[in-house]
Image (cartoon, rainbow, N blue to C red):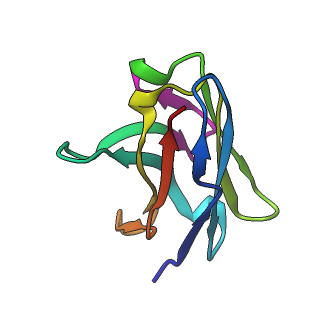
């Protein structure tokens, strides 16, 4: 069982920035992939960014150039640096990991990000 604890959400003005954190139990190298997803009201959950065990990353087109996913191996923590935030980035952001051994998927509880003036 993997435990994920997210933090860092909040209210920010358009053009502002936030950094989300996801603390995971277990070694980061036991995960095939770690990622951030988001779900806005009335919409399906969508991939925002993902980082693979190799260190490779991929991003949704809507956040490329504004968001950066990273991880701290020593702290088993993943981050999402979000810059130049837009109102359409408003959503609940979820941390996700997929284990290397069983390809099991685990989710965090979610953290609200609201971009509004």
The reply, left or right, for residue 10 in relation to residue 17 is: left
Front one among 18 and 66: 18
Please, is residue 98 above or below residue 106 in the view? above
The reply, left or right, for residue 83 in relation to residue 3 is: right
Q: How many marks?
A: 0
Q: Which residue appears at 47% of the width and 47% of the height?
A: 36
Front one among 77 and 17: 17
The reply, left or right, for residue 45 in relation to residue 117 is: left
In the displayed orientation, state which residue is furthest to the bottom. Answer: 1
Residue 112, image x, y percentages: 47, 55
Quadrant where the image shows the C terminus: top right
In the displayed orientation, state which residue is furthest to the front. Answer: 117
Front one among 112 and 14: 14
Q: Which residue appears at 25% of the width and 48% of the height?
A: 41
Please, is residue 62 above or below residue 35 in the view? above
In the displayed orientation, state which residue is furthest to the right. Answer: 74
Residue 83, image x, y percentages: 65, 27
- 4 magenta-colored: no
Front one among 5 and 53: 5
Quadrant where the image shows the N terminus: bottom left
Q: Which residue appears at 62% of the width and 76% of the height?
A: 25
Please, is residue 102 above or below residue 56 in the view? below
Residue 115, image x, y percentages: 51, 36
Residue 65, image x, y percentages: 59, 16
Q: Which residue appears at 60% of the width and 32% of the height?
A: 13
Image: magenta residue range: 50-60
């Amino acid at each position: 069982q993997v435990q994920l604890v997210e933090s860092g959400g909040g209210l920010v003005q358009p053009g502002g920035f936030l950094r989300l954190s996801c603390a995971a139990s277990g070694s980061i190298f036991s995960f095939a992939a770690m990622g951030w997803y988001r779900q806005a009201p009335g919409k399906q959950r969508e991939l925002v960014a993902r980082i693979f065990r190799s260190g490779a990353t991929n991003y949704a087109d809507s956040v490329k150039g504004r968001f950066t996913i990273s991880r701290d191996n020593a702290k088993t923590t993943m981050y999402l640096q979000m810059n130049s935030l837009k109102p359409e980035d408003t959503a609940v952001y979820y941390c996700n990991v997929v284990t290397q051994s069983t390809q099991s998927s685990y989710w965090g509880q979610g953290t609200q990000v609201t971009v509004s003036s």
